[in-house]
Image: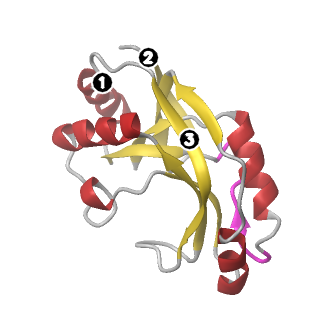
Amino acid sequence: MYSLNVPPPSAVTRLASDLARDVPRARARQRGEHTLVCKRLGDGDGARLAARAREALSGVAPFELRVSGIDLFETPSSGPGPVIYLDVESPGLQRLHERLCAAFDPVAGIEADGYTPHVTIARGGELTSARRLARREIDPIRWTADRLSVWDSHRSVPVREFSLPL
């Protein structure tokens, strides 16, 4: 599966890694694995999907984002739960997601109206620990997305990057 992602800054990835220590027996994201999915592009030829994404990104300018808190999916749509994550607020990201949903079919239940922008902290582990962590307050982190990447989830690597504006 390929996706178009916003690379999170080191302050966000460092926070996610630090918080993961408080969710025993959960699988934390490793260094370089933290992502913020803007839109899943699908399976197939990564180069073709990247070219389609680039076309859909025409005219997109850098946009602001803000990590605002911690939350969780107790029963995620796929994979083990719970999923504890950093909640991301961004009207620009929401608009970009909607634009990409017009170019790439939305994944039912998790995109379009079901889209929740987030950076995963950890997956699995004890629900009580995840709930306790989700109640913790954090200092917001703000940043500007000035690049996007096409991410290959099978290999956990970016395969193409785009600088904004396009």
Residue 94 shows up from this direction:
yes
Q: Are the residues at dot 1 and dot 2 in contact (C-beta closer than 8 Å)?
A: yes
- Report whether 104 appears left or right of 126: left
The residue located at (49%, 30%) in the rendering is: 64
Question: Which image quadrant: the C terminus?
Answer: top left
C-alpha span from label 1 to label 2: 9 Å
Q: Which of marks 3 and 1 is nearer the N terminus?
A: 1
Q: What stretch is highlighted in magenta?
A: 24-33
The residue located at (31%, 62%) in the rendering is: 114
Of residues 4 and 153, which is closer to you in this image? 4
Q: What element carries label 2?
A: loop
Q: What element carries label 1?
A: loop
Identify the colour scheme used.
secondary structure
Label 1: which residue?
57
The residue located at (25%, 28%) in the rendering is: 52
Question: What amino acid is labelled 3 in the image?
Answer: Arg
